[in-house]
């Protein structure tokens, strides 16, 4: 039975009417018109639906909206600041780290989370962090390079001791 729930998404509070068992992905796409997160496998295995919940990557297709509470949700739409893309978004463009782009928002969200906890990851650490995100087009080498570029850009733009 639908309930009224407050969600904190991309810095704004939204009132939604949804069954608490419905997926966060469905609410984001169908009620809030945030369509950057994609429905891929529906089982939390491919990563196309990845969003950040309290800065940690979560598969929105298997996250029930009733479990979110007051947590902060960030979607791909919430990364850019005005006309300035987040450094990870920009590096994905610069490196052409996508072909069909279906996986891209999930890849970017996972990379943003990685760089917030590990601002200087090795290639092996990047590969390990991105294991749960599948790119059927095979652009993984460009994805790794884009994340390395973003790490450098974030390091140059951040004051000492702060995180992206």
Image (spheres, rainbow, N blue to C red):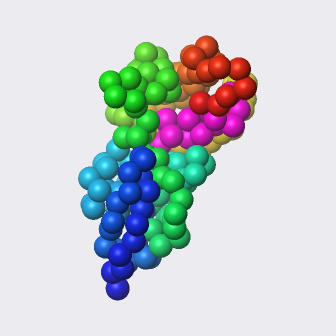
Seen from the viewer's position, the closer of residues 121 and 75 is 75
Counting from the top left corner in percent of width and height, residue 151 is at: 61, 22
Query: Which one is nearer the viewer's eye here, 137 or 29?
Result: 29
Q: Is residue 14 left or right of residue 153?
A: left
Which quadrant does the N terminus fall into?
Answer: bottom left
Where residue 149 sits in the image (x, y, percent)?
57, 17
Q: Main secondary structure of the magenta part?
A: helix
- Is 55 included in the stretch rendered in magenta? no
Q: Which residues are magenta?
A: 106-119
Pick whichever, 71 or 151, lies toward us. 71
Residue at screen point 47% across, 73% down: 66
The correct choice, above or below, for 163 with respect to 24 in the image is: above
Q: Is residue 30 above or below residue 120?
A: below
Residue drawn 49% across the image and 23% down it: 87
Q: The C terminus appears in which quarter of the rendering?
A: top right
Note whether residue 108 is visible: yes
> Which of these two is toward me, 31 or 127?
31
Quadrant in which residue 89 is drawn: top left
Inspect this view and state whether residue 148 appears: no
In the image, residue 109 lies in the stretch drawn in magenta: yes
Q: Measured from the top left, where is residue 147 in percent x and y?
A: 57, 25
For the point 58% across and 51% down, which residue is it?
A: 54
Residue 21, by quadrant, is bottom left
* Residue sitting at x 40%, y 66%: 6
As drawn, 162 above or below 49: above
Q: Is 65 on the left-hand or right-hand side of 113?
A: left
Q: Is residue 74 left or right of residue 17?
A: right
């Amino acid at each position: 039975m639908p309930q009224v729930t407050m969600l904190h998404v991309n810095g704004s509070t939204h009132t939604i009417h949804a069954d608490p068992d419905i997926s966060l992905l469905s609410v984001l796409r169908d009620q809030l018109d945030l369509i950057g997160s994609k429905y891929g496998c529906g089982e939390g295995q491919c990563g196309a639906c990845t969003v950040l919940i309290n800065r940690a990557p979560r598969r929105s297709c298997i996250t029930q909206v009733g479990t979110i509470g007051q947590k902060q949700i960030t979607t791909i739409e919430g990364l850019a600041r005005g006309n300035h893309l987040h450094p990870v978004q920009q590096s994905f463009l610069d490196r052409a780290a996508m072909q069909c782009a279906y996986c891209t928002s999930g890849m970017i969200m996972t990379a943003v989370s990685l760089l917030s906890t590990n601002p200087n990851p090795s290639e092996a650490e990047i590969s390990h962090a991105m294991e749960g995100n599948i790119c059927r087009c095979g652009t993984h080498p460009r994805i790794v390079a884009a994340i390395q570029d973003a790490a450098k850009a974030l390091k140059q733009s951040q004051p000492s001791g702060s995180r992206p």
